Image (tube, rainbow, N blue to C red):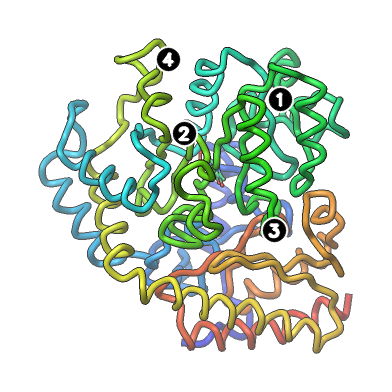
Amino acid sequence: MSPQFPAPVRTRSQALQQRAERFFPGGVNSPVRAFRAVGGAPPFVERAEGAWLTDADRNRYIDYFGSWGSMILGHAFPRVVEAIERAARNSPSFGASTAAEADLAERITACYPAIEKLRFVSSGTEATMSAIRLARAATGRKIIVKFEGCYHGHSDGLLVKAGSGVATFGIPGSAGVPEEIARLTLALPFNDLSAVEAAFAAHPGEIAAVILEPIVGNAGCIPPAPGYLAGLRALTAREGALLIADEVMTGFRVALGGALELYGIDAGPAAPDLVTLGKIVGGGLPVGVFGGKRALMDLLAPLGPVYQAGTLSGNPLAMAAGIATLTYLQDHAAQVYPYLEATAKAVAEGVAAEAAQAGVSLTLNRVGAMWTWFFTPGPVTDYAQAARSDKTAFGRFHRAMLLAGVWLPPSQFEAAFLGTAHGDEETAATIAAAREAFRVVAAG
Ligand SMILES: Cc1ncc(COP(=O)(O)O)c(C=O)c1O
């Protein structure tokens, strides 16, 4: 199946968008789904299978956002769908413990030796928010260090934007975040150990935790510089602060054990104190995880004084989808990860080669099956450099690709993903679409 030429009709999607705007701010239930950054209106999805999305007008698109990274096995993967159906027949929720929770926990801890104990929540936002609370309780300190361009969900303290310079406290990245809370978050440039060193020097004994995406995905894809993660571990350990690796996006994606496995910091003194997971671990259903050292996790209620709870935490349908997904990944890891690497390399580099051919200046950053084509000569090693990208050109590229049946994440600052259902046919169709799209971009 090749992409559609000429432009697809989207009359039903347009009508559905108008109706959605009556009910939902901007017509969406999560702002990243809107197309404001790239122009045009988002198609409404009716169904999806494998690597392909089908919209309400029956147009088909190759999917490169995969429910924002969740769908590593492709859409409607039969074993996952069957597991959800089986679990649903026993009732979708009990609000009491089930064996499935420990079944999934066993699989998670097998992939993540740094996680000795864990708790399930229903989103990545909840996972990071709870990890921060735990870190503050464990250290008796208040300040959190995060990095510019890293996104850890929408809890108040983690929405803080870039502060300029180490001594500057962050400003609220969203209206509605009280300044008193924003002040407790320091936002520093990624890949700059000296900034972290200076923050510890400026706030001795006050920093509870450093939280980061070990590979940034939420400013577009930005890998850690060699030695950066080990340097953060050494600094935090020296200063008595916790290190929180937010692997909501990278967990089970860049390797079975995520970035921690990929960079060899998954166990022993090199490992972070706490890890957060989401997306893939729920197989397309809402699951988040925070976990880590046993002594830290035992601070949680009902054992300890840190309160954290959830009506639907460990939901049986979500556990079933997670177990089916992780079981497949574990049983086929030796094939899955090399396949994802080869396929993502072919797509990402194939498209970048078309840009070069058309005279469009791009920087490609990629780690396994997540990547970004930044519309800037680069290099891109932090958010400030990512922000130099030509967003207008990216918007033109995005619209042209969508017309050709390739649905990229609708922002220059979101990583693209693919999964095991993407193959040669999708790769060839994507590169062919890019050839045309870059002509449009180059024409200005
Ligand atoms: C690294 C990271 N952390 C946390 C979150 C928040 O997860 P959720 O959207 O499930 O609340 C995201 C979401 O994209 C993320 O990429």
Task: Tell me, yes or no, whether the two marked residues, 1 and 3, touch with CB atoms within 8 Å.
Answer: no
Residue under circle 1?
Answer: 185
Alpha carbon distance from label 2 to label 1: 17 Å
Q: How many marks?
A: 4
Amino acid identity at mark 2:
Ala
Q: Amino acid at mark 4?
A: Val
Give the residue pinned by disc 3. 226
Q: Residues within 10 Å of mark 4 (few under 14, many from 20)?
A: some
Mark found first going from the N terminus, 2 or 4: 2
- Determine the residue positioned at 61% across, 85% down: 5
- Looking at the rendered structure, the kind of residue marked 3 is Pro
Measure the C-alpha gap from mark 1 to mark 3.
Answer: 26 Å
Q: Quadrant of residue 65?
A: bottom right
Residue visible at 64% across and 68% down in the picture: 366
Residue 301's x, y, as percent?
34, 16
Residue 216, x across and y down, in percent: 65, 52
